[in-house]
Image: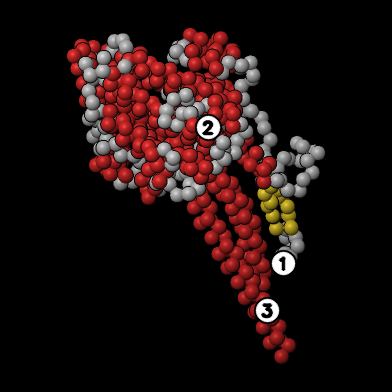
């Protein structure tokens, strides 16, 4: 019952909530980012990060460093923290934590399938998979020729199996079919996660509904913008939008027929929650849209920590760490390419 | 005596025009080099921005296709002797963008490719990273395309720089 979590939450979730709040206090601050933005080389970045929680993960890396190495090692830290929380969690928190990783699982499946289609070696594809999305039979994906085989041979025994019912066909896999499969799977996953959080009820349902609805709306906008000028039909585009969120259903109907960024802007400005996001952009421009969405997401994620006794803090922490890793990746790329003047184009401060 | 002076003056003015021609060519060359550096820098940053937007798993080198496919863009080399003062053939490079090769589609005899087909070719190349890619990746593709055009122009200008230098040496020496 909502409001009575304070009586029972700490029995099973108290320790892990304390752990995740402790991890949250280890997120990089504005002062850390200012120091990192002034670095001249990637070794300088490594030196500054050695004073943070990333220190132990980067200290043994030899010079010259690469940006991919920095991202890889920072991701390992996130994975270690996640695995520690998962092994300590009981139901339903353990299921909730597993839900957080299904997005990465979908990305890994698509990476393996696409790489195999392009005749790449499976081992080099596996090295590029996100560690949070790994599962036992992932390498077997390389033998499938179409989605029916993908499901029958491999995915039927994975948590993604229920999401395949909407996209099983015997059509051969090509780049567009794979893209549609990716977005259909992600849509089914988001809807399933949303339903799960609703069943949990209480503060978790309230906070996660807002966060997942924002995710669904952002995906709808990105799908619309990325599919402009492609062979994806309006009907197919509309099928990729999730069945919840602020934009569902009327915003989706309007987004499905948009042919340029200004039409997308016209649709989104009707929603007060998104007016200020699109207000930051000039007409015809979409370069800063990602940053505007990330800033809004970070604001909502940070707000979830203001309330206690709910699972939203775990989701929020994972997403904030991923944002931090994106920031580090961008700063590293700007430093490596000698483009430090552009570093603030994509860095989103968390605190 | 008068004829000798006239011949000397003519030779001097020819040498000066050759020198000017050489310096102009070098100036063009340096401007193009700077333009190329700027365009490539922009292209790489846009690629990083696309990677930041789409995620590392959607945009990385393991997705580049190893399947055999013909190049939609070719460079043709021609030797042009017209207007050359030194009687040596100056190489000229011509870029053919987004057109099928001569051995591929023999029934496509279009002299130019329509803008729609060009867009389709561009989209097809990017589809190795997915059917729906970020506009930042498309911007990066355009930057690298511009850089390729600049490179071909640099090669041709370099050829004219060497040609002008040879002509200058010939008249001076």
Taking the spot 32% from the left edge, 12% from the top edge, the residue there is A92
Q: Is residue B2 visible?
A: yes
Q: Nearer the viewer, residue A322 or A199?
A: A199
Q: Which mark is residue A253?
A: 2
Spatial CA span between label 2 and label 3: 77 Å
Q: Chain of mark 3?
A: B
The local crowd at label 1, few if under 14, some if 14 to 19, many if 20 or more residues have their Cα within 10 Å, is: some
Rendered-image quadrant of the N terminus of chain A: top left
Taking the spot 73% from the left edge, 52% from the top edge, the residue there is B78
Q: Is residue A53 above or below residue A204?
A: below
Q: Which mark is residue B85?
A: 1
The extreme right residue here reads B107
Which secondary structure lies at badge 2?
Answer: helix
Q: Nearer the viewer, residue A194 or A346?
A: A194
Spatial CA span between label 2 and label 1: 68 Å
The extreme left residue here reads A7
Q: Chain of mark 2?
A: A
Q: Which mark is residue B45?
A: none
Q: Is residue B69 above or below residue A2?
A: below
Percent coordinates x, y for residue A334 in the rendering: 39, 44
Rendered-image quadrant of the C terminus of chain A: top left
What residue is disc 3 on? Answer: B11
Q: Is residue B155 above or below residue A345?
A: below
């Amino acid at each position: 019952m909502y409001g009575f979590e304070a009586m029972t939450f700490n029995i099973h979730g108290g320790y892990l909530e304390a752990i995740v709040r402790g991890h949250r206090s280890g997120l990089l601050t504005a002062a850390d980012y200012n120091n990192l933005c002034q670095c001249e080389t990637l070794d300088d970045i490594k030196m500054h990060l050695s004073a943070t929680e990333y220190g132990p993960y980067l200290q043994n890396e030899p010079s010259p460093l690469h940006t991919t190495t920095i991202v890889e090692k920072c991701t390992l830290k996130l994975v270690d923290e996640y695995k520690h929380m998962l092994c300590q969690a009981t139901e339903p928190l353990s299921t909730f934590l597993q839900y957080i990783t299904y997005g990465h699982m979908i990305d890994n499946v698509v990476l393996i399938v696409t790489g195999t289609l392009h005749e790449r070696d499976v081992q080099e594809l596996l090295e590029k998979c996100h560690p949070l999305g790994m599962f036992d039979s992932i390498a077997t994906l390389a033998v499938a020729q179409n989605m029916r085989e993908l499901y029958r041979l491999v995915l039927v025994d994975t948590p993604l199996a229920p999401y395949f019912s909407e996209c099983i066909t015997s059509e051969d896999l090509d780049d567009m079919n794979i893209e549609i499969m990716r977005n259909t799977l992600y849509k089914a996953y988001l809807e399933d996660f949303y339903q799960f959080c609703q069943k949990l009820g209480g503060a978790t349902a309230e906070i996660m509904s807002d966060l997942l609805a924002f995710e669904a709306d952002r995906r709808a906008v990105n799908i619309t913008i990325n599919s402009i000028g492609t062979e994806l039909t309006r009907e197919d585009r509309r099928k990729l939008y999730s069945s919840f969120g602020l934009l569902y259903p009327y915003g989706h109907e309007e987004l499905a027929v948009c042919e340029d960024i200004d039409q997308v802007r016209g649709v989104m400005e009707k929603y007060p929650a998104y007016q200020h996001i699109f207000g930051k952009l000039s007409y015809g421009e979409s370069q800063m849209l990602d940053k505007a969405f990330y800033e809004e997401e970070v604001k909502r994620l940070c707000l979830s920590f203001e309330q206690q006794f709910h699972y939203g803090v775990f989701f929020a922490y994972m997403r904030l760490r991923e944002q931090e890793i994106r920031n580090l990746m961008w700063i590293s790329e700007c430093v490596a390419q000698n483009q430090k003047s552009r570093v603030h184009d994509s860095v989103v401060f968390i605190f | 005596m008068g004829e000798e002076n006239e011949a000397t003056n003519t030779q001097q003015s020819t040498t000066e025009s050759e020198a000017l021609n050489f310096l102009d060519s070098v100036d063009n060359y340096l401007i193009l080099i700077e333009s190329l550096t700027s365009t490539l820098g922009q292209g790489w940053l846009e690629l990083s921005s696309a990677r930041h937007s789409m995620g590392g798993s959607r945009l990385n080198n393991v997705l580049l296709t190893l399947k055999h496919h013909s190049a939609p863009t070719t460079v043709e080399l021609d030797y042009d002797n017209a207007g050359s003062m030194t009687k040596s053939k100056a190489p000229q490079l011509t870029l053919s963008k987004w057109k099928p090769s001569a051995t591929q589609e023999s029934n496509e005899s279009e002299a130019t490719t329509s803008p729609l087909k060009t867009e389709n070719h561009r989209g097809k190349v990017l589809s190795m990273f997915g059917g729906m890619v970020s506009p930042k990746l498309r911007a990066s593709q355009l930057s690298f395309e511009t850089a390729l055009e600049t490179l071909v122009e640099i090669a041709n200008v370099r050829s004219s720089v060497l040609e002008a230098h040879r002509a200058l040496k010939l008249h001076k020496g």
